[in-house]
Image: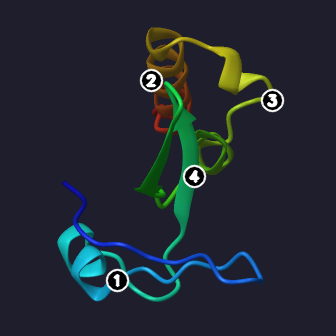
Amino acid sequence: MAIARSRITAQGQVSIPVAVMRRFGLAPGDFIDWDGYNGQLLVRKAGKFSLGDVATALGLQEGVLHKTGPELLEGVKERMRRRHAVR
């Protein structure tokens, strides 16, 4: 059963019902992601930071988005070892 129903305007806009905003912790200015899965439309609250944002903040090299979780973790550990090494 649906939580609420919205109508798409002629301009392609959709209003999010207050009940949905409260239930999922949405606020004005938040981003939502639109996706599809098995022929259904999925709408979800977007994360605050992408993996690319995190990689940039950590100073990791380009191409980091194609690494596995363990490879990323090892890269972060190595960066922290170098950054905090006793000189």
Residue found 63% across the figure and 50% down from its top = 53
Kind of residue at badge 4: Trp
- Dot 1, how many residues are within 10 Å of its Cα: few (below 14), some (14-19), or many (20+)? few
Spatial separation of the CA atoms under disc 4 and disc 2: 34 Å
Kind of residue at badge 2: Lys
Kind of residue at badge 1: Pro
Tell me the residue that label 2 is attached to.
77
Residue found 34% across the figure and 83% down from its top = 17
Tell me the residue that label 1 is attached to.
17
Q: Nearer the viewer, residue 51 or 1?
A: 1
Tell me the residue that label 4 is attached to.
34
Spatial separation of the CA atoms under disc 4 and disc 3: 27 Å
Q: Nearer the viewer, mark 1 or mark 2?
A: 1
- Looking at the rendered structure, the secondary structure element under dot 3 is loop
- Looking at the rendered structure, the secondary structure element under dot 2 is helix
Tell me the residue that label 3 is attached to.
62
